[in-house]
Amino acid sequence: MARIGSKWTGSGRKAMLLGSGELGKEVAIELQRMGIEVVACDKYANAPAMQVADKCRVFNMLDADALRNAILEENPDNIIPEVEAIATPVLVELEEKGAHVTPTAKAALLTMNREGIRRLAAEELGVATSPYRFASDYEEFKAAVEAVGIPCVVKPIMSSSGHGQSVIKSEDDIENSWKIAQEGGRAGAGRVIVEGFVDFDYEITLLTVRSVAGTSFCEPIGHIQIDGDYRYSWQPQAMTPEAKKSAQEIARKVTDALGGYGIFGVELFIKGDEVIFSEVSPRPHDTGMVTMISQELSEFALHARALSGLPVPEIRFLGPSASRAIVVEGNSKEVVMDSLEKVLEEPGVQMRIFGKPEVVGHRRMGVILATADTVEEARAKADRAYAKLKVEVL
């Protein structure tokens, strides 16, 4: 039987978040609602999840010794990776000794870099993907570009939020794309993936939940990315019944191979009824922030429930909704969101301010959420609210 005792007692439960950004913050809030002690970890102090956690630890999670020591000292019931930049072999090692990693250490290891999950999907599971090659040095990279063809997309095998990603549109872009990838990788310079362009009508995130009750799917989420970074999302994305069924079959196949309990953000390209696998994250997805207004249980609530060993008997969708990321540009440790009374004057609009301590260059600092009778109306409402927002970088 699933049991949760009083916090800070022998029967209480403790969860350790490895990564404390805005997604981790929402997971921490949901865990707190269940009476679970939360330890938030990240490479910098005062990260969003740390602001709502019971305890915080600051260290480089790519440092194997530091990661191992922190986990052994805290002895959590659940280790919850929330970012890719983690020394995942340590998680594998500790899981073999009895630690509980969400969803599994294997999933964290395979998905922390694009090579592991792409080879699993395409080469082991036989799932359709875009053409691809991997490269470890510049000569291999040029050969990979030639094999895949121009235009193509270049990404570090370890990165997020579009960092290090570029598009090669002509031979003149090759050298610069290599440089961008080497500077943008989560673990520094290293191996890259070169992907051929896919002719698609739209792309979706299919949030897939594995719990003790089985596998469930949220309504598909459409989204727009700029330079690989999420800016808009909406739910539901209109799909043919055949495409939706195929998307769910692919998501089930990939997540079954990864195993464990929790939510997975499965990214897919759609062309008519054809579905092509792109990536998967074994954790809540940034495009899924729309579920904070579109569903009875957000992706974060679903994740907390599933990883705790509790059933997800249904996922109740409330209605067409949209989100728009608030991306701030500048260099400062003080950002002010102004005119909020105007932002929130329309019914069906919500806002989340992440509380990140600084912005350097550009950074996602909040999100506007909207719901309406149709997706188009929800997106327009989110745009209207965004237009009223004033951001001051002091």
Image (cartoon, rainbow, N blue to C red):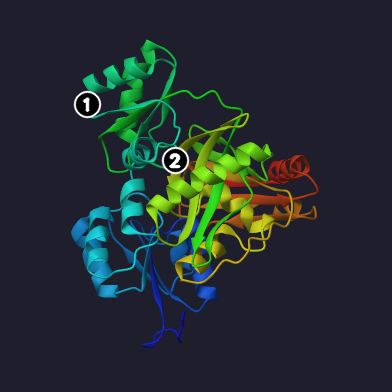
Could you give the CA–CA distance between mark 2 and mark 1, rounded to whole angstroms?
A: 23 Å
Three-letter amino acid code of the residue under disc 2: Glu
**Mark 2 vs 1, N-terminal side:** 1
Q: From this viewpoint, which residue is outermost toward the left?
A: 65
Rendered image quadrant of residue 19:
bottom left
Residue 295 located left or right of residue 21 = right
Residue in the image at 64% along x and 37% along y: 242
Q: Which mark is residue 256?
A: none
**What residue lies at 33% left-to-right and 17% top-to-bottom?**
147
Left or right of 293: which side holds 58? left
> Residue 345, percent across and down?
79, 54
On screen, residue 124 above or below 140: below
Could one spot residue 176 in this view of the protein? Answer: yes
Camera-nearest label, 2 or 1:
2
Seen at 36% across and 42% down, the residue is: 117
Mark 1 surroundings: few (<14), some (14-19) or many (≥20) residues within 10 A? some
Towards the viewer: 1 or 157: 1
**How far from the left and from the top, in percent, is residue 244?**
62, 41
What's the residue type where badge 1 is placed? Asp
Which residue carries the number 1 mark? 137
**176 relative position to 68: left or right:** right
Name the one closer to the observer, 351 or 278: 278
Residue tagged by mark 2? 279
Crowding at dot 2, Cα within 10 Å, few <14 / some 14-19 / many 20+, comes out as some
